[in-house]
Amino acid sequence: MDKKIGLIAGGGDFPLMFAKEAKALGYGVFTVGFSGITSKEIERYSEAVSWFKLGQVSAPIEFFKRSGVAKALMAGSTEHASIFGGIMPDMRAAKILLRLKDKKAASILGALVEELNKDGIEIISSTTFLEHLLPAPGVLAGSKPGKDAMKNIEVGWKAAKALSGLDIGLTVVVRDRAVVAVEGMEGTDECIKRAGTLLRDRGVPGKGLLADLAVVKVARPAQNMRFDLPVVGLGTLDSARNARAATLAIEAKKTLIIEKDLFLAKAREYGVTVMALDAGSF
C-alpha cells in the first residue's frame, strides 16, 4: 500500500475515529497499541496493529520502520498518573525520562516526538483528517448565555488558561464566578464529577441544570497540536449534565469533539448549552 500512516493509540474513541477516517481515505493505518489502554476495536480499521506495554519506545519505533511508516500521529488518552507507577520503561524510555527537567505531560510527549524524529518518523498534527471536528467560535447547541452567565464563563476561561499554562489541567468548573473544581491528573470527566459531588454534598437545592454552573475546557497557551489535545465526547457531556452544569464551553479550533453530530444532538436533548470560544469572545 502506497499511502501509509502510523498511529500511536491511547484510550478512548479518538484513535478509532482517526483510524476509521484514514482507512476511508485509502490509507493503511499501522497502529501502535497499548495493552489495557487501547481499544481492541482499533484492529478493525488498521492495516496492522502491534501491541506493547506502556513505557516501551524502541520496539514501537522498530514496528513503524519495518512497516515503512514515515509519518505518524498520537491520538487518545493515557492517564498522566501512569508515570508514577504501572509502567516498565525500556532502556530508551528510561534515558528519555532521566534527561527531562520535569515529568509534565507536555515534556514527556515532546521528548518522545524528538526521539521518533531521530529515527526518521515525523509526528504530525493529531487533527489530521479530523479538522471538521474542531468547531469555529459560536454557540453550537442550546441558547446563547446571558451577560451574567458569560461573566461566569470568563472567570472559568481565565482560570483554565492560567492552570493549563502550568500544565496542571485544561478544565475548570465554575459557579457564580467561583471555582468549584480544577482538573488534575484525574482527567476532565472525573473533575466534572467531583464538582457535582461537591455541590450535592453542600446541599445545593433543586434537581435541574444550574444556570450559573459552567464547565470550561481550553487548550494550553502554546498548545502543540501534535499531542495531548483537548478533547470532549459523550462522556464529558454526560458528566456535565449529571453535575447539573447548564453550559459547556470549549476553546474554538483547538478542542476536538468526538462524534460531533451526536454530541451536539445529545446536548440539545439534555438542555446543555455548548459554546466554542476564543480570546475575542469576552
Image (cartoon, grey):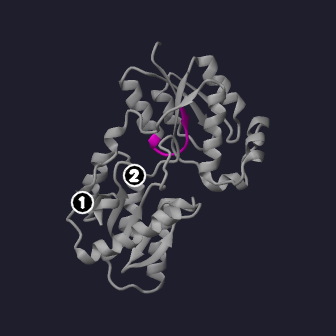
Please name the residue shown 29% across and 59% down the image. Answer: 275
The residue tagged 2 is 233
Of residues 89 and 100, the one nearer the viewer is 100
In the picture provided, is 31 more to the left or to the right than 56?
Answer: left
Of the 4 image quadrants, the one containing the C terminus is bottom left
Residue sitting at x 46%, y 28%: 44
Q: Between 217 and 271, which is closer to the camera in this rendering?
A: 217
Q: Nearer the viewer, residue 25 or 230?
A: 230
As drawn, the residue found furthest toward the top would be 1
- The disc placed on residue 181 is none
In the displayed structure, does residue 76 sit left or right of residue 66?
left
Q: Position of residue 133 (x, y in %)?
A: 33, 43
Residue 163 vs 107, above or below: the answer is: below
Q: How far across and down, in percent of the image, does residue 101 sit?
A: 72, 52
Whether residue 209 is visible to the viewer of this picture, yes or no, is: no
Badge 1: how crowded within 10 Å, few (<14), some, or many (20+)? few
Magenta span: 7-14
Residue 121 lies in the magenta stretch:
no
Question: Which label is found at residue 269?
Answer: 1
| Figure quadrant of residue 31 | top right
Q: Does dot 2 land on a helix, a strand or a loop?
A: loop
